[in-house]
Amino acid sequence: MKLDVNVLRYLSKDDFRVLTAVEMGMRNHEIVPCELVERIACLKHGGTYKVLKNLLKYKLLHHDSSKYDGFRLTYLGYDFLAIKTLVNRGIFTGVGRQIGVGKESDIFEVAQEDGTILAMKLHRLGRTSFRAVKSKRDYLRHRSSFSWLYLSRLAALKEFAFMKALEEHDFPTPKAIDCNRHCVIMSLVEGYPLVQVKQLQNPETVFEKIIGIVVRLAEHGLIHCDFNEFNIMIDDDEKLTMIDFPQMVSVSHQNAQMYFDRDIECIFKFFRKRFNMTFQEDRDESDETEVEVDENSRPSFYDITKDANALDRELEASGFTKKEQNDLDKVCGLEKSKDSDEDEDEDDDEESADEEQNRESNEEENLNEMKSLQLKEKEHNSSDGVEVDNNEK
Ligand code: ADP
Ligand code: MG
């Protein structure tokens, strides 16, 4: 999908108001009925239908008339809401070229007023028919498109919270700048993903540093869970930066040891293959490999984590809740953590029932929210939300 930010210039205040109305409606409708969009958007002289047509033209909305006439946001529509909010907050002023395509994300350069370039990661959970999607069909049965937006938002929130906490503990991560919806803004890392590097000046040192990061993470109560050559950046001075945190888990997770060992194994395997390194466990009499690393054995999960400082508790304090963690784990193919609720299915059913019950009151809430946005606009407060100046950007 192409992110054509020029479209932003053509979108009016009303366009954003209606786009936001659809987003609000999606809290409790997979497809938001036209009348509800109209009621939430509450445009002064009517005209919602004309705006809807315009948004459809730019592919910011998807029209669905299978059950009733309604709309849902596309990822592009969601991108625009996040970008608009962050631009209004003054985080950046323009979007540049795409610098990365992950399994479930798109990464772009964004520019600040003074020319500083940052990285913008747009999470796109559900883009690939990956991992546990099939087995988690049930979870998504009632609200598939909303779920993907919701889960992408959680992934961004989690990534941002982890990046911030890790940075505060001097881990080599990008600097976390801001987060809105499914979008994380961070500093731009110089260098390349390790997977692109064919030669290193000091492979042993780099290897040891990398293992050192995994070990220190575990000492802080955390496991990356996707720690491999794709998520480690390295620059010309062989300085390392780890990226990509939405799947991290606590060492108290029931499969923690497996995830830890898997992270370690990925690194061993990569250095063995790419840089011909051998380890204690590989050696036999006839071995004549070029480089050897004096590693007696792999780090022991038990030894490292028995006195782990629980950084994960700080993370919880940062606003990323257990429920959100569980929602995310369900589709990320991770088992539930030890201390989470026992009966998952029951949870889901209750949730759907609750949703039905709360539909009315949520709609009320949406309307109130829209009203307060209108008030804000009147006060010419341009900090956040739907306020759009047609001439800016
Ligand atoms: P995914 O979760 O989809 O794997 P990543 O966070 O790993 O996404 O990012 C995908 C790619 O984008 C990375 O391999 C890297 O090339 C690039 N990238 C991500 N974050 C940054 C950053 N802060 N600075 C520079 N490049 C980045
Ligand atoms: Mg990645």
Image (cartoon, rainbow, N blue to C red):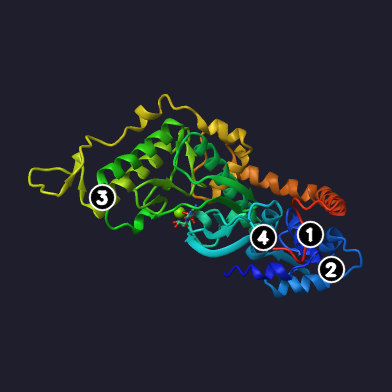
Q: Which numbered marker is on residue 48? A: 2
Mark 2 within 8 Å of ligand 1, using the beta carbon: no
| Crowding near the residue tagged with mark 2, few <14, some 14–19, many ≥20 C-alpha atoms within 10 Å | many
| Crowding near the residue tagged with mark 4, few <14, some 14–19, many ≥20 C-alpha atoms within 10 Å | many
Mark 2 or 1, nearer chain start: 1
Q: Which residue is drawn at 67% across and 54% down?
A: 86
Mark 4 or 1, nearer chain start: 1
| Crowding near the residue tagged with mark 1, few <14, some 14–19, many ≥20 C-alpha atoms within 10 Å | many
Pointer 4 residue: 78
Mark 3 or 1, nearer chain start: 1
- Looking at the rendered structure, the kind of residue marked 4 is Tyr
CA gap, disc 2 to disc 3? 61 Å
Q: Are marks 2 and 1 in contact (CB under 8 Å)?
A: yes
State the SS at label 4. helix
Relative vertical location of residue 1 with respect to residue 358 in this rendering, above or below: below
State the SS at label 1. helix
Pointer 3 residue: 201
Q: Which numbered marker is on residue 21? A: 1
CA gap, disc 4 to disc 1? 12 Å
The front one of 19 and 265 is 19
Of labels 3 and 1, the one closer to you: 3
Q: Which residue lies furthest to the front in this view?
A: 114
